[in-house]
Amino acid sequence: MPEYRIPPDDDVRAAIARVFQTRHQVTSQRALKALVEKDLAGREKFRVGEGRVRLLAIDSGLIALEIHTREAEEKRALTKCPVCGARVKRLRNMTVFGGTVTLGFRCPKCGYWSGLRRRVPILYVFTMK
Ligand SMILES: [Zn+2]
């Protein structure tokens, strides 16, 4: 028998909502995961992946997400948002030659953006809206 159980999405969503009833801000994804697991723990212990907590927190519409990044060397086109998985939009500009040039990418769902040099997320701050 496993020592930890995996909670269903609805339970994680409810736990996220309860966490933000007692605090305004959580300053890392790891801290939010720990708070959610603590909230869910009772007779059984639950384990929730950090990425899963982040996605459900974004989907909840309860929080504003602040994304801290470092800039990577690589220049590669993005199609999917590394933060929330949504399809990113290209940021384009007209060139003097009448064409367009891609300046970067922006996620319409979570607000992540990147220039051509990839901005790699390193820290997330969750603030109640
Ligand atoms: Zn996104």
Image (spheres, rainbow, N blue to C red):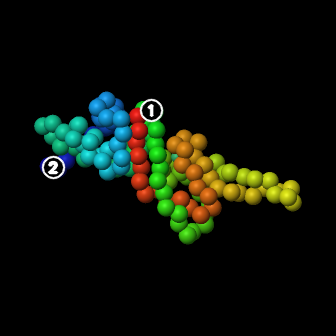
Residue placed at 42% from the left, 49% from the top? 124
119 displayed left or right of 13: right
Check the picture and name the quadrant holding the C terminus. Answer: top left
The answer to whether residue 62 is above or below residue 91 is above
Can you give x and y, in whole percent of width and height, for residue 86 in the image? 54, 46
60 displayed left or right of 18: right
Can you give x and y, in whole percent of width and height, for residue 5 in the image? 22, 44
Of badges 2 and 1, the one in the foreground is 1
Residue placed at 85% from the left, 58% from the top? 96
Q: Amino acid at mark 1?
A: Lys
Q: Amino acid at mark 2?
A: Glu
Q: CA distance from mark 2 to mark 1?
A: 35 Å
Residue placed at 64% from the left, 56% from the top? 104
Residue 3 marker: 2
What is the crowding at mark 1: few (fewer than 14 residues within 10 Å), some, or many (at least 20)? few
The answer to whether residue 127 is above or below residue 80 is above
* Residue 52 seen in render: no
Front-most of residues 74 and 78: 74
The answer to whether residue 87 is above or below residue 103 is above
Can you give x and y, in whole percent of width and height, for residue 83 in the image? 48, 50
Q: Which residue is mark 1?
A: 129
What is the crowding at mark 2: few (fewer than 14 residues within 10 Å), some, or many (at least 20)? few
Residue 70 marker: none
Front-most of residues 18 and 4: 18
Q: Are marks 2 and 1 in contact (CB under 8 Å)?
A: no
Can you give x and y, in whole percent of width and height, for residue 50 in the image? 34, 50
- Of helix, strand and loop, which one carries label 1? loop
- Of helix, strand and loop, which one carries label 2? loop
Residue placed at 75% from the left, 53% from the top? 93
The earlier-in-sequence mark between 2 and 1 is: 2
Front-most of residues 1 and 98: 98
* Residue 89 seen in render: yes
